[in-house]
Image: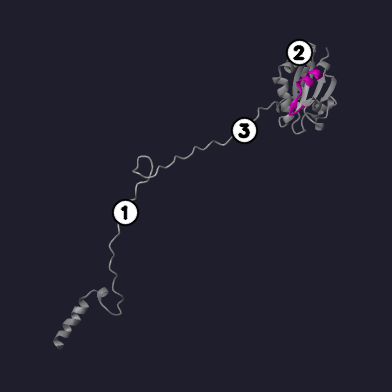
Amino acid sequence: MTKFLPLAVVALFALPASAQPGPGGPPAAQAKPAVTAAPAAPQGGPGFGSGADVAPAAPVAPAEVKPTPVPVYDEAADAKADVAAAVAKAKKEKKRVLVTLGANWCGWCRALDRTFTKDEKVAAALAKSFVSVKVDVGRMKKNLDLAASWGADPKKGVPLLVVLDGNGKTVTLQDTGSLEAGKGHDPEKILAFLAANSGV
C-alpha cells in the first residue's frame, strides 16, 4: 500500500493549482456560455412591417419678428440748416414753414406724420401752403435751443407744431393734443389749423 503513496502525491502535484483542493484558493469558476443578444425588432413606421405608424413631427412655426419701424425723423440731420433751407424756399414760393418737433420713439409723432402723408386732403393742404420740415428732439436733449428761439418747449409734449413765416419768424405754436381723435389725429381739425395759419 505504501508503494502507491508516492504515485498519489505525484499525481496530486501534477494537477493545475487551480484544480487542487485546499488552501490554494477556490476552484476557478467555469466560464459561462456567451449569450448572443437578439436582433432588435424593426421600428414601426412607413415601410417597416406591421408596426404602428409614427406620426410626422408637427412643423414648427418661425418666431414672430416684429419689423423695425422706419424712422420718420432724421436723427443725424442738421436741423438748423434744414429749417433755414425751408424758410428760404417758403419765402421764394410765398408759403409758410410748418415745423414739426418730435422724435422717432414717440408714437403720437408717428401717428401725426402718417396723417400728414397718408391723408390726401391734409397732404394736399400742406403742399399748397407750407414747406414742411421735421426737427428731431431726441430724448428731449436735441435742438432745444432752436425750439426755444421760436418760443417752443418740446419738454411739455411732442409732437409740437411751429408755423414760421418766410422770414423765419414765429407765427404760432400748436400743441397737437387738441388735434387728436381716438388713437390718431382728426384730419378735419388739422385742416382747420392749416387753413387758419396758411397766410392766405
Quadrant of the drawing holding the C terminus:
top right
Tell which of 50 and 35 is nearer to you.
Answer: 50
- Going from N to C along the chain, the mark reached first, 3 or 1, is 1
Task: Give the image location of residue 25, x and y in percent.
Answer: 31, 76
Question: How far across and down, in percent of the image, does residue 175 sit?
Answer: 82, 26
Q: Is residue 4 visible?
A: yes
Instruction: Please give the label number shown on residue 82.
Output: none
Residue marked by disc 3: 66
Q: Considering the numbered disc 3 on the image, is that residue within a helix, a strand or a loop?
A: loop
Q: CA distance from mark 2 to mark 1?
A: 90 Å
Measured along the vertical axis of the image, is residue 151 above or below residue 198? below
Place residue 5 in its image quadrant.
bottom left
Name the residue type under label 3. Lys
The reply to whether the C-beta atoms of the residues labelled 3 and 2 are less than 8 Å apart is no
Instruction: Tell me which label, 2 or 1, sits earlier in the chain.
Output: 1
To which quarter of the image does residue 78 belong? top right
Packing grade of label 1 (10 A; few <14, some 14-19, many >=20) is few
Q: Nearer the viewer, residue 128 or 132?
A: 128
Q: Quadrant of the N terminus?
A: bottom left
Q: Nearer the viewer, mark 2 or mark 1?
A: 1
Which residue range is magenta in the image?
181-194
Residue 124 figure quarter: top right
Where residue 168 sits: x, y (%)?
82, 19
Residue kind at label 2, given as amino acid type:
Lys
Which mark is drawn over residue 128? 2
* Residue tagged 1: 38
Say whether disc 3 or disc 2 marks the residue closer to the N-terminus.
Answer: 3
Q: Horizontal placement of 65 versus 170: left or right? A: left
In the rendered view, does 158 fall on the left or right side of 12? right
Does the stretch in magenta take in 50? no
Label 3 to label 2, Cα distance in Å? Answer: 36 Å
